[in-house]
Amino acid sequence: MIEAPLEDPSNGDNVYKSVFIIFFQGDQLKTRVKKICEGFRATLYPCPEAPADRREMAMGVMTRIEDLNTVLGQTQDHRHRVLVAAAKNLKNWFVKVRKIKAIYHTLNLFNLDVTQKCLIAECWVPVLDLESIQMALRRGTERSGGSSVPPILNRMETYEDPPTYNRTNKFTKAFQALIDAYGVASYREMNPAPYTIITFPFLFAVMFGDLGHGTIMALFGLWMILKEKPLSAKKSDNEIWNIFFGGRYIIFLMGVFSMYTGLIYNDIFSKSLNIFGSGWTINYNESTIMTNKALQLDPRDAFHRTYPLGMDPVWQVAPLNKIIFMNGFKMKLSIILGVIHMIFGVVVGLFNHRYFKNTLNIYAEFIPQMIFLIFLFFYMTLLMFIKWMRYSASNPDPKSSHCAPSILITFINMVLFKESTVLTESCETPYMYSGQAGIQRLLVLSAFVCVPWMLFAKPIIIMQERKKRQHQPILPYSGEGQDAENGQPQSIQPAVTESHGGHDNEDMSEIFIHQGIHTIEYVLGSVSHTASYLRLWALSLAHAQLAEVLWNMVLQNGLKTGGAIGGVALWAIFAFWAILTVGILVLMEGLSAFLHTLRLHWVEFQSKFYAGQGYAFQPFAFEAILEGSGSSTEE
Amino acid sequence: MGALPFIIFTAIFGVIGIVLPIVAPKGPNRGIVQCVLILTGATCWLFWLCCYMAQMNPLIGPKLHQNTILIMAREWGNQLPVNPEPHH
């Protein structure tokens, strides 16, 4: 058997070949041997008898092998060179082919004119861009050698739903993407994205509030922003990096706001800053101090001024009841922020109604919605402010701290029409201001009246309008207005859109059901969403506690060890602490707070006004096509 | 409870949220810049206000450990009214 494998020319595999020398006598054996060899598909070579001839043959074969090897080598070299030269142009060719293919694909969508001489395209065009499109068409005509017939741009009327186009720059693009992920805005409705630019990082920061972690996040975002161009040129496949990089402005803003809320919460890596000096002083005498393991400061004697910026630093060193105080503050803060956010949402809905000329909605939906929200929940936030202002430990009864009524109990009693009870005799009254009982009853009754208002006003008015229309002669078909939303409720038009103005096709029962669902959603939602905002408190508490645990259980051990060993220990422990801080507190808590903020925006805020039934405007753009195909066909 | 911090911080956030949007640079982004400034001023002011008002009239005081009290008395310049010798 030949030791070196030979290459099979048909499929390039290496095969082992064996050589046999066959001796035979006579012709008959010769034919038989030949047949057998043909059966085995063996190649037959004549072997000369004389050794000299055999040597000659061997040499001839060797020469031929060498020649053939040379030819093979040259061919391979040549092929390699041709391929290398082609490879340089390969990317350009791919791009060209994709562009051409996309152009022809789009051309296929055109209609052929009646005269078979030109192509007609129907497309959506942003009104503001009509000028630039005309100029582009003119440029195209010039560049293609100035054909005799210039392309014409005509504005058409249609009843179809136009796509939604929100112009964004690199800063606003990420926030718009957050909103679009839930649902693209319906045509011409209010876009929540500009408000999201600030409310999103702000609500995130309320949950994340730590000066140190906020700084880390802000620096990371800032680095990505400053190195925008080089980083985006390096097209990366890493999904996670692309997500972070795409949201660099969001991350930066979240970090900056977290620095602010961290400053107000007075929390930097679970420690407090003491910029202005604490407002609390010690005034127990020495014997009292030495005989008690723990003492509570009385605000009447120990408190002399409010810390001007944020939380007083004394609370950080009072682990025994710091959480009780912070809970009261943060829970009230969450409800206040939540109610204001929701009222803002309802007001945005008002702008929607006004734009679509939906006066029925303003009277039948917006006003009762506002009354319900304000009379109940905004009143609760007013109670919080009143309690903060009126009750103090340094006040005598009835405005002292132990007479301060619980706002939650007050609110529950208010809604259930129960009488509040006095806590002690000296408190005189369970109410915060005179006339509270009467005012509260009025507020609750007004709010309860809003429910049937929301439920029945709109369907009944629609019913009456239809009856009126049936008695009127049918108006001439006025096919005006390319947007069906502009159709007046009186004219008879096929209302294709979701606008409430033209509910002509729906059954009365369907309208009642729709309105019922809408009302129940709103009323129940206002209670549940208000409570849902308490997650602002919950997450900030969890974040603060995690940071404290990390400091007390990890870094403090390194700080407390003394001597040279302490130095080395601190160095190692700091690394561990830093990794846990970035991994758990910044990344994990950051992701968690991000998701909760997103939920607050998508559900609690947007359910008050957002329809989100549109589809995105996707113009023909080479970058989008190349980017899309480039990522899908990666070699 | 002084009015000074209230005035100062309301003024700061008032400048951010009311004055700056009026003098915002004209350009395609004017609307967004105004929106951002107003919202920033409003939210940050409200946040500061809630924190300040929550501490204006405290209903409870901090409960401190003995060690903390002694250190606080020494480091934060508070004098113990009787037996002013601080323990080291």
Image (cartoon, coloured by chain):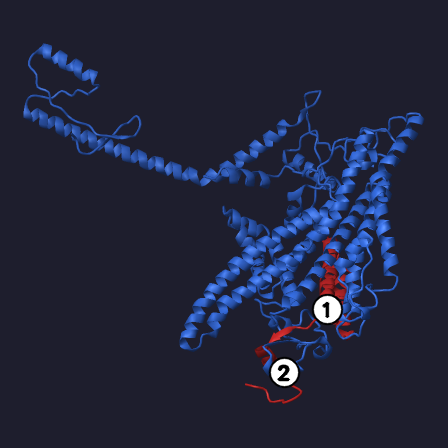
Assess whether mark 1 and mark 2 are in contact (beta carbons under 8 angstroms).
no
- Foreground residue among B32 and A547: A547
In the rendered view, tell whether residue A411 sits above or below residue A433: above
Chain identifier matching the blue colour in the rendered picture = A
Classify residue B26 by image quadrant. bottom right
Residue at numbered disc 2: A288
- Foreground residue among A400 and A267: A400
Q: Mark 1, chain letter?
A: B
Residue at numbered disc 1: B52
For chain B, what colour was chosen?
red
Q: Amino acid at mark 2?
A: Thr
Question: What residue is drawn where x is 42% and y is 78%?
Answer: A563
Specify whether residue A190 is in view.
no
Q: Is residue A6 left or right of residue A256?
A: left
Query: x and y percent of residue A447 in the render?
Result: 84, 49
Query: x and y percent of residue B51 in the render?
Result: 71, 66
CA distance for labels 2 and 1: 31 Å
- Foreground residue among A8 and A283: A283
- Foreground residue among A451 and B12: A451
Specify whether residue A438 is in view.
yes
Say the numbered circle drawn on residue A233: none
Q: Is residue A228 left or right of residue A440?
A: left
Q: Are marks 2 and 1 on the same chain?
A: no
Task: Name the secondary structure under disc 1.
Answer: helix
Query: x and y percent of residue B55 in the render?
Result: 72, 70
Question: What residue is drawn where x is 29% and y is 35%?
Answer: A74
